[in-house]
Image (cartoon, grey):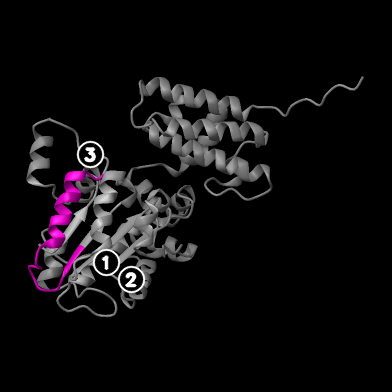
Amino acid sequence: MTASAPAPWIAAQRRQLLAQRGHAWLLQGPSGLGQYALAYELVRAWLCDAPGADGACGQCASCHAIAVHTHADLCVLMPETVMLALGWPLSEKAQAEIDEKKRKPSREIRVDAMREAVEFCQRTSARGRGKAVLVYPAEQMNHVTANALLKTLEEPPGDTRFVLASEAAHLLLPTIRSRCLGHSLHWPQADEALAWLQAQGLSADDAKAHWRAAGGRPQDALALAQAGRSPAAWAQLPQAMARGEVAALADYSPAQAIAALQKLCHDLQACAVGAPPRYFAPESLPPAPPLLALARWAQALAKAARSAEHPFNQGLLLEALVAQARQTLHSQPPRPPRTP
């Protein structure tokens, strides 16, 4: 099995990072820029039997083992939900617990998995080219898990290298960040991102629409397209919220609905101060409400996001979110005080 070629901006960063020395990298930046893809390319190159300046050869036994997710010298630390989504196998114990309905897949990187990773680091390399640990998304480590990794980062085994990929690096322990070489993901140029999206099978119009809806983050744009999001429905969302139409969010989860409304709030705040919108076309937006109303809405959405994964009643939550959006969009500026 041969891995597909990474996006051009990922390939350029891969070459840049492979030319530098270091036992631990922290790849950071907002979602959709390719943290996981770049981390994956680095561990492929580190473990490859015949690596070059441009990364792994893609043909050797090591590259094949990574492609089928069975490499003995690669340890992947992810929340179980992410591992399942990306096709990485869970440990036998974890898989058995989930299969037997004893628990649901974890949304955090479990302490048990970290302890297994620490033990992995102490073992001798199976193929003789060292070992690699990939942590993604690194911000999903709790304090106990992060402290377990910290001890290994402080005194790393000589043949083990680490790459931590994060979409919220500010949530990591300062001691974790200080022990890694940092790299901020590059934002691709618009023409480069749009060309890549079209190469993934999107039409030119859909690529542009999803790219805008994702705020210029190409992999988030591809995820929107793969989820079946309609560009036309996205363009109509602001006016639908102004009319209070709950049906416009009917196929959204609570977390997705809150994220969409946060994008709308952001764009209206930008317009209110004379800046261009980021996620919606200017012509699709209603007139911007007063900044105070938008600020209160942003705070309410941030609060709702903290419990979005465990709503008491999804239907009632969506109705409340739409009612709140409609009320904000129809807010009027305060009347000036009457003169005596």
Mark 3, secondary structure of its residue? loop
Position in image of residue 120 (x %, y %) = 13, 58
**Residue 238, picture quadrant:** top right
Q: Amino acid at mark 3?
A: Ser
Please tell me which residue is depicted at 41% across the width and 33% down the height of the picture. Answer: 306
Q: Are marks 3 and 1 in contact (CB under 8 Å)?
A: no
Answer yes or no: is residue 289 visible: no
- Which dot marks residue 56? none
Q: Nearer the viewer, residue 211 or 28?
A: 28
- Please give left or right for residue 18 compared with residue 270 in the image: left
- Please give left or right for residue 111 compared with residue 261 in the image: left
- Which dot marks residue 14? 2
Question: Relative to residue 193, is residue 128 depicted above or below?
Answer: below
Of marks 1 and 2, which one's residue comes earlier in the chain? 2
User: What separation in Å lies between label 3 and label 1 (alpha carbons)?
Assistant: 25 Å
Q: Which residue is mark 3?
A: 106
Q: Is residue 288 magenta?
A: no
Question: Relative to residue 32, is residue 127 depicted above or below?
Answer: below
Q: Amino acid at mark 1?
A: Glu
User: What is the number of callouts on the image?
Assistant: 3
Q: Which residue is mark 1?
A: 41
Mark 1, secondary structure of its residue? helix
- Magenta residues span 109-132
Mark 2, secondary structure of its residue? helix
- Please give left or right for residue 76 compared with residue 313 in the image: left
Please tell me which residue is depicted at 19% across the width and 71% down the height of the picture. Answer: 158
Q: Is residue 120 magenta?
A: yes
